[in-house]
Image (cartoon, grey):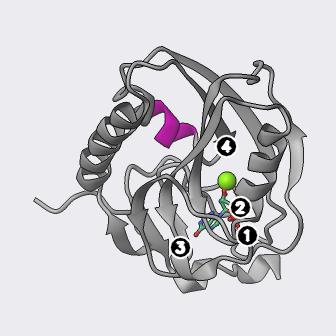
Amino acid sequence: MPESSHPDLESVLITETAIRRRIKKLGGEIMAAYGDEPITVISIINGAILFTADLLRQIDNPIRLDCIRISSYRNETKSIGKPQLIHTLTLDVTNRHVLLIDDILDTGKTLSMVAKLIRRLNPASLKVCILLDKEGRREVPLEADFVGFKIPDKFVVGYGLDFAERYRNLPCIGVLKPQLQNPPEWA
Ligand code: IMP
Ligand code: MG
């Protein structure tokens, strides 16, 4: 039976089943890396909400969860400026093992800005976990420690990723139809 798509998608890049399977393995990779250590997870919202919720249920370590809100100053499909901090951390991360989670690593501007902010607070360690990696797009050098999927340079939505705040609730990840990436009434 074909897995669910959405009429606004040109194609499904990663199915719901593939996401579930990969996240289970990713949980295992993270547990192997941390042993019995407690982890302070910092999720970059809104994009990483769905990924974080599913990934954390695959990790048995003691976990503290905090969220940080960043505006990446995108004009829907392209990153156009410096990311801005909208809401900062509430948990203390000094001397803690910090795992930073985001939905996608694109130019690297967002994650490098957040990583810099966390490093200034002297964590015991800092690792980065992302669901998607658009490898060829980096403007700031940054590699993640844990990667769900490497994807081509296409604008994707679903499973937390949005276009103008829509499509975050799709269970799969897909490429938005090009004619919907620039609705004429918005031009
Ligand atoms: P970066 O700062 O360029 O690495 O991009 C960071 C943010 O841009 C991510 O956290 C996403 O919210 C957003 N982003 C990048 N590529 C896509 C995409 O293909 N679809 C939806 N959001 C994206
Ligand atoms: Mg984001």
User: Mark 1 = which residue?
Assistant: 76
Q: Quadrant of the C terminus?
A: bottom right
Does the beta carbon at disc 3 come under 8 Å from ligand 1?
A: yes
* Tag 2–tag 3 contact (CB < 8 Å): no
- Residue type pointed to by label 3: Lys
Which residue appears at 37% of the width and 56% of the height? 172
Does the beta carbon at disc 4 come under 8 Å from ligand 2?
A: yes
Q: Secondary structure at mark 3?
A: loop
* Tag 2–tag 4 contact (CB < 8 Å): no
Provide residue 160's location: percent of width, then percent of height.
54, 49
Q: Earlier in the sequence, mark 4 or mark 1?
A: 4
User: Mark 4 = which residue?
Assistant: 46
Provide residue 121's location: percent of width, then percent of height.
83, 32
User: Mark 2 = which residue?
Assistant: 164
* Tag 2–tag 1 contact (CB < 8 Å): yes
Q: How many angstroms separate mark 4 from mark 1 (CA)?
A: 14 Å
Residue in the foreground of this view, choosing between 127 and 68: 127
Q: Secondary structure at mark 1?
A: loop
* Tag 3–tag 1 contact (CB < 8 Å): no
